[in-house]
Amino acid sequence: MSGPLVSVVLPVFNGGAYVERAVRSVLEQDYRRLEVIAIDDGSTDDSLRTLGRLQAQDGRLKIVSRENRGLVPTLNEGLQLAQGELIGRMDADDICYPTRISRQVETFRGAPSLGMCGTNFTIVHRSDRQHSANVEFWPDRDLPILSLFFTAFRHSTVMFNRRVLDPQMLRYDPGYPHAEDFDLFRRITGAHPTTVLREPLLAYRIHPASVTSTAARQMRRTHLKIVCENLQRFGRALAIPGLMQLDAGSLPQKLDEMARLTEHVFDLADSRAASEQPPFRVGASSMFFFLREMAIEEFGIGFAAQFLDRTDGWRRMRRREVYVVQALRGAPSLAMSAWRGLRGLDRLHWAMRSHRLPGLA
């Protein structure tokens, strides 16, 4: 197949359980003009041995192995090594569907000014059963606004257009640990057209070793840092030193900062022109739920109830969630057990709707 060379950057750290399926899913794409740059970031399992075996079977796989340096340096190293006109991202525990690369290449051909293209995805659990991610799609014109508040692209689905993006922009900033993609995407969407394809072209795997599980606290702080920087661009400067601390610190201070941040984002949405209000309100709502989860997971149900009191957040909650938090706010241990039970019901709901795809495992 003729077309531009596509480089796929794939960081690997102790990915032995899944990396073979991930790499094969790229090498078996119906678009053949590609290279896979796998950077072994100091793995201590059999990841490197697996990569070497795969390289012997397909020379399009390039391997770099060295001491552990962390995700951001590894990603930037991959970008520097990439030879392709287009650069795709891939994680060592995800799975590309066979037409992912060709569909993204086709999209760039039809819109050469695009800076970045993401896709829809499905979610795969440890049992190798998958369900739809039920992604809500917004017009491409709203992506720059949405990207001020959250990551509107699944990282391992994106592809970058080197003809459009300045090399200084196409770089992950180490100043945003565990949310480096959020920072990169807000910069790209703020400067160039972007799009998200509606069809699911990747299976995103969730498991206990996921970065989102092991580094959630730091990720939340970096997320808040980025949002506050974005708010400052709109004249909404807000200092939240209490929330930025990783330790418990002063809970009254954290509560006050959470409430003021919520007020800021909803006031900003209300102040925008009518054409911009819908995406700003989606962003404000996402920030509310982000803070609610932070309140529950880090500071407990009682603290979360106070946050909901201060922000009139009860009306945004599901009825069963309101019942658990309101009825049990004075019994923290029981309330948290009930809350975990609700999350378990949600997981059971998705498990009942999930199915195994042939060849997915």
Image (cartoon, rainbow, N blue to C red):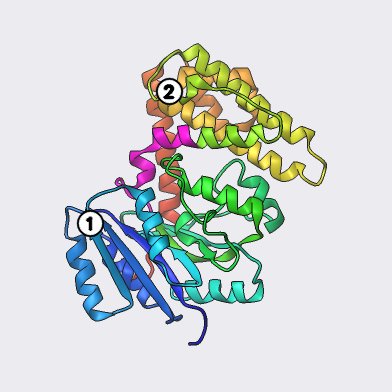
Q: Is label 1 in a helix, a strand or a loop?
A: strand
> Residue 270, image x and y in percent?
77, 33
Which label number is shown at residue 66? 1
N-terminal-most mark, 2 or 1 = 1
* 244 up-or-down from 92: above or below: above
Q: Residues within 10 Å of mark 1 (few under 14, many from 20)?
A: few
Q: Which residue sits at x=56%, y=43%? A: 150
> Residue 276, image x and y in percent?
77, 44
Task: List the residue tagged with mark 2.
Answer: 245
* Dominant SS in magenta: helix
Q: Quadrant of the C terminus?
A: bottom left
In this view, the residue in front, 102 or 193, is 193
| Residue 207 is a magenta residue | yes
Q: Residues within 10 Å of mark 2 (few under 14, many from 20)?
A: some
The amino acid marked with disc number 2 is Gln
Q: Which residues are magenta?
A: 205-222
Q: Is residue 355 visible?
A: no
Q: Which residue sits at x=48%, y=49%? A: 181
The amino acid marked with disc number 1 is Arg
Q: Answer with left or right where residue 191 lies relative to residue 307.
A: right
Q: Answer with left or right where residue 57 lies relative to residue 260.
A: left
In this view, the residue in front, 291 or 331, is 291
Q: Is residue 109 visible?
A: yes
Which label number is shown at residue 306? none
* 289 up-or-down from 7: above or below: above
Looking at the rendered structure, the number of numbered marks drawn on it comes to: 2
**Distance between the alpha carbons at the discs numbered 2 and 1:** 33 Å
